[in-house]
Image: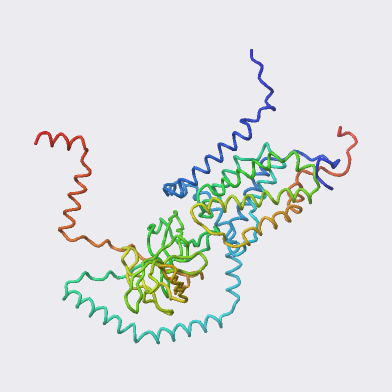
């Protein structure tokens, strides 16, 4: 008979061993998530438990806000309604002609046999709250996998590009704003068609990087999406240049911009449908198909064939 | 009445479900849309440190790890970022628990402050490796508020463990 210690002395593994285990586990999670981004399914699984809690936490806050707006008076809404009606009338002239222009453009493009422009379609989503993470600029919107939102869809508001859907949960989705440090948008200067990429700075501003010191960019220039990434449709306003530092000791100019859309205000945004991929010309498509077929065959089989030949 | 080891008052044993409920409430408080208040303390870290000091056998690194994962998903931060910070804080709190409880509340709060600061620092360190920048000094304001909250927190969380003040003559202690 072996003498075990009484059960109240049993405390499991030593604290240092447990610390090593848990720290190693969380460090490997950090590494996998930052390098490979393969934990999305795990994240969605955990969100099934955290999402109801989050909703429970938000419910009283939302209720208070709603009560506030309910009592804020009908006059404000009437004034807003009148303003909107006036704005619609102001825009009507341009909009009506726009339809005609679009039709005409379509016809001319057909005549020239240029690929037709994809029309922007999307669905309106409500931004619920900003993600609590202080190191990034992300917001949570109220549509997710249930509404067939997929990661990568561009998000715009009434003025311009807001960001991009980066993560989708069953009921909500996460939008990374263009001011986030890791978000880049390919843009074009409207004035002269100069193409570049605009990066977020993390402090609400954007920076146009890798432009030579003598590049033709001026303060006040409007930047629109260039559409070269195959994600954003071309022509959406992104930012306006506010400050340029040209230092000849650096090869690049530092060009600061501010976003045009109300990126940091929360309201309704439009999640645009994913852009149709542009088909390759037949010759190129055949070539790439042949290459992929060749690479997919097993090397052993290939060798055998060669020997036979 | 000071509920430390030097006080003559004996506390009733803690009920495990009370720890679970307070942790859930802390999660709810953390899930409030508080991104505009950077000075809001990290309630989960505070509660985890509290229970790791008070009841090192009921709460510790394991619960810290699970709560950290929940916070990572809810915050949409890097996976494992909160988990690592909470596990380290829980380890420090459990190993310091025998020492901290000898002090009066003000000095306990002074012990808790560096632990709370470490939680923020570890998270910043994890995020700084892929290239994040410090979001401002307000990021480190939360721990100070948390240390101030330590006084009411201790009072409220120990309320269910107080025994009635009137002495029962038949009770052994």
Question: Would residue A261 be seen by someone viewing this image from the given angle?
Answer: no
Say which of A124 and B84 sits in front. B84
The residue shown at (38%, 69%) is: A211
Question: Against A20, is A254 above or below?
Answer: below
The residue under the point 45% across, 58% down is A173
Quadrant of residue A257 in the image?
bottom left
Q: Is residue A48 left or right of residue B3?
A: left
- Left or right of residue A298: residue B137: right
Residue B84 pos. (x, y %): 57, 45
The percent position of residue A3, horizontal first and vertical second, equals 66, 16
Residue B42 appears in which quarter of the rendering? bottom right
Residue A275 visible: yes
Placement of A86 over or under B89, stated as above or below:
below
Can you say whether A148 is above or below B93 in the image? below
Q: Residue furthest left?
A: A309
Colour option used: rainbow
Left or right: where A66 falls relative to A306 = right
Identify which residue, A121 or A241, lies in the foreground.
A241
Residue A74 position, x and y percent, is: 56, 80
Percent x, y for residue A11?
65, 30
């Amino acid at each position: 008979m072996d003498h075990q210690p009484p059960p109240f002395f049993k405390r499991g593994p030593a604290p240092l061993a447990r610390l090593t285990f848990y720290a190693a586990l969380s460090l490997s999670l950090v590494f996998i998530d930052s390098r490979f981004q393969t934990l999305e399914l795990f994240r969605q699984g955990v969100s099934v438990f955290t999402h109801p809690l989050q909703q429970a936490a938000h419910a009283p806050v939302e209720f208070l806000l709603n009560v506030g707006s309910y009592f804020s008076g009908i006059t404000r809404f009437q004034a807003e309604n009148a303003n909107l009606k006036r704005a619609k009338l102001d825009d009507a002239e341009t909009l009506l002609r726009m339809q005609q222009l679009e039709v005409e453009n379509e016809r001319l493009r057909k005549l020239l046999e240029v690929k037709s422009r994809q029309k922007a379609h999307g669905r309106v989503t409500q931004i619920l709250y900003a993600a609590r993470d202080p190191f990034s600029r992300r917001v949570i919107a109220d549509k997710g996998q249930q509404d067939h939102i997929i990661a990568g869809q561009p998000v715009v508001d009434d003025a311009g590009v807001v960001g991009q859907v980066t993560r989708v949960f069953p009921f909500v989705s996460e939008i990374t704003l263009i001011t986030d440090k890791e978000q880049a948008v390919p843009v074009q200067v409207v004035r002269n068609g100069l193409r570049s990429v605009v990066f977020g700075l993390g402090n609400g501003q954007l920076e146009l990087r890798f432009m030579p010191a003598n590049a033709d960019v001026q303060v006040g220039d409007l930047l629109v999406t260039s559409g070269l990434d195959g994600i954003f449709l071309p022509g959406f306003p992104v930012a306006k240049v506010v400050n340029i530092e040209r230092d000849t000791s650096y090869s690049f100019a530092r060009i600061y911009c501010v976003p045009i859309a109300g990126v940091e205000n929360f309201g309704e945004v439009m999640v645009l449908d994913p852009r149709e991929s542009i088909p390759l010309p037949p010759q190129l498509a055949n070539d790439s198909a042949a290459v992929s077929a060749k690479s997919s065959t097993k090397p052993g089989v290939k060798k055998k064939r060669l020997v036979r030949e | 009445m000071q509920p430390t080891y030097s006080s003559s008052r004996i506390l009733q044993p803690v009920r495990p479900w009370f720890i679970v409920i307070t942790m859930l409430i802390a999660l709810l408080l953390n899930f409030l849309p508080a991104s505009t208040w950077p000075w809001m303390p990290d309630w989960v870290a505070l509660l985890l440190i509290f229970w790791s000091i008070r009841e090192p056998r009921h709460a510790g690194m394991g619960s810290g790890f699970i709560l950290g994962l929940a916070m990572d998903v809810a915050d949409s931060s890097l996976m494992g970022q909160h988990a690592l910070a909470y596990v380290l804080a829980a380890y420090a709190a459990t190993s310091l628990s025998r020492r901290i409880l000898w002090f009066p509340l003000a000095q306990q709060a002074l012990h808790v402050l560096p632990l709370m600061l470490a939680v923020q620092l570890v998270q910043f360190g994890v995020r700084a490796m892929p290239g994040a920048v410090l979001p401002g000094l307000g990021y480190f304001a939360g721990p100070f508020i948390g240390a101030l909250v330590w006084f009411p927190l201790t009072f409220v969380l120990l309320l269910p463990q107080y025994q009635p003040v009137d002495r029962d003559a038949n009770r052994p202690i």
